[in-house]
Amino acid sequence: MLLVGLGGLGCAVAPYLASSGVGRVTLCDFDRIEHSNLARQILYTPGDVGQRKTEVAAAYLSHLNPAVQLATVEERIDDHHARRLMANHDITIDASDNYGTRLAVNRASLAVSKPWVMGSCIRMEGQLILFPGQGDAPCYRCVYGGAPDTLEDCQGSGVFAPVAGIIGTSMAHVALLYLAGTSVPSALHLLDATSYRWRSLSVRRNPRCKDCGPKSIT
């Protein structure tokens, strides 16, 4: 399992991967822990401020389940890194907080035909979806189009801390279902945490998509 991002979402995802017996987990994050992270990034404590997220998270998960094989990558994920890493893992969970990283993961997924789970949250809203990376299923760009890499993030706009936990654990749930061979609907799942309501939207492949359309995958 490849986990990209160890912020609020990744901190909720990671313990369930380790405790559920996923044999090998690679943790990717280039950042260090800050005081502002602590409200929603529950793997870290005030004493961890200044340390690498990957190192602290790996120590926590190793204590949780000593049998899990852990690797860490302290680099920002681009197209080259994403393709190389995803080719060596059964499924990827993207818990990053920016559009550029998700597009890189999306392109790599299509190039190596590997699935990935995307999740995001802001304020009182969250969403997640599984992208198979092959067949007639839509890809990330089909669903989200050409949004710029200046979308709002948690640091700039805030997020109600438990929303990150709800979406993160749901991402782990979807990924573990996939690994267990259970069918996962190809739908975009949306959470309105103010009313605590979920809804699912059907999504379709865009035949003119820049990433998965004809002549786009090399």
Image (cartoon, helix red, strand yellow):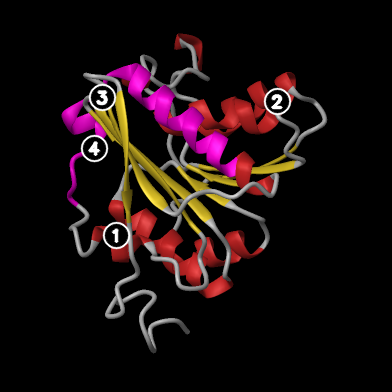
N-terminal-most mark, 4 or 3? 4
Q: Three-letter amino acid code at disc 4?
A: Asp
Tell me the CA gap for discs 1 and 3.
Answer: 23 Å
Q: For the stretch drawn in magenta, what is the main secondary structure? A: helix
Q: Dividing the picture into quarters, in which one does residue 103 lie?
A: bottom left
Which class describes the residues within 10 Å of circle 1: few (<14), some (14-19), or many (20+)? Answer: some
Q: Three-letter amino acid code at disc 2?
A: Ser
Question: Residue at point 44% right, 19% down?
Answer: 49
Q: Position of residue 167 (x, y in %)?
A: 41, 31
The mark found on residue 143 in the picture is 1
Tell me the CA gap for discs 2 and 3.
Answer: 26 Å
- Tell me if residue 52 can be seen: no
Q: Is residue 83 magenta?
A: no
Q: Secondary structure at mark 3?
A: loop
Question: Residue at point 45% right, 72% down?
Answer: 136
Q: Which residue is mark 4?
A: 153
Which class describes the residues within 10 Å of circle 2: few (<14), some (14-19), or many (20+)? Answer: some
Tell me the CA gap for discs 4 and 3.
Answer: 9 Å
Q: Secondary structure at mark 1?
A: helix
Q: Which residue is mark 3?
A: 159
Q: Which residues are magenta?
A: 150-175
